Amino acid sequence: MTVEIACKEAVFHFNKHHLIDPATPTWVIKTGGKTYQVEHVTADLPWSTKETVGSEHTKGSIKFHKALLTIDDNNHAKLTPLKDSDLTRIRAMKRNYTRIIIHGQFNEIAQWIKTNAVKHSPIKNITGGCGSRFQICDIKKQEDLVMMALIFTNSYRVLQANELYFRAYEDPELLAKLEADDYYDGENDEDDDQDE
């Protein structure tokens, strides 16, 4: 399972215990009072050094500010610039909100949400390929989601964090690309140009 962490500051250094026990991951990343041991680290953002000469453990490390730390299933860490959309997405996931994509009964669902005072994030209209349209929002209480499932079967589905529309909800750039059908342009172009 991939882990995402919003970091005000992240510090990483070599794990000296790896020299004693090679099964121990090579690198240590510290952020928010927690320590993560990982096998590999890549970074796509500026960094500075942090010298801790008085420390008996680590004399120096690499420091990042406002980073999104992603640790994948292979225990590889990647540090990228933290965007506001990343922060919003991670906060929503921590609060256990459920992001849904509505693909039918738009007016009925909107009215039901309003009538039943369902706590939700702003409902965003999204146009998809071939003239399709959707609405996306976060439902903040699981009980409301259960009731929706009983009333509006096959009119919406729960989005998962790895889906493009899940991320596009907070990322205006990605949303604009999806709506303009630009996201997939350029992929597999070589297949289109082949002569038969």
Image (spheres, rainbow, N blue to C red):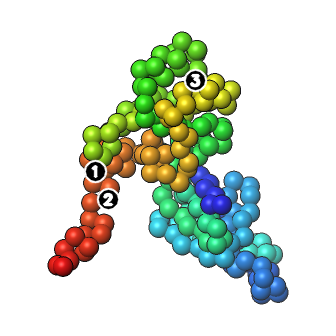
Q: Nearer the viewer, mark 2 or mark 3?
A: 3
Q: Position of residue 47 (x, y in %)?
A: 52, 67
Q: Residue at x 53, y 20 (%)?
A: 113
Q: Residue at x 66, y 71 (%)?
A: 75
Q: Amino acid at mark 2?
A: Tyr
Determine whether the residue tagged by mark 1 lies in a helix, strand or loop: loop
Q: Is residue 60 above or below residue 96?
A: below
Residue picked out by circle 3 = 151
Screen quadrant of the N terminus: bottom right
Determine whether the residue tagged by mark 3 lies in a helix, strand or loop: helix
Any part of residue 10 in sight: no
Any part of residue 99 in sight: yes
Residue picked out by circle 2 = 184
Q: Which mark is residue 47?
A: none
Q: Is residue 182 above or below residue 26?
A: above
Screen quadrant of the C terminus: bottom left
Q: Position of residue 68 (x, y in %)?
A: 55, 57
The mark nearer the N terminus, 3 or 1, is: 3
Q: For marks 2 and 1, give the CA distance.
A: 7 Å
Marks 2 and 1 in Cβ contact (< 8 Å): yes
Q: Which mark is residue 181?
A: 1
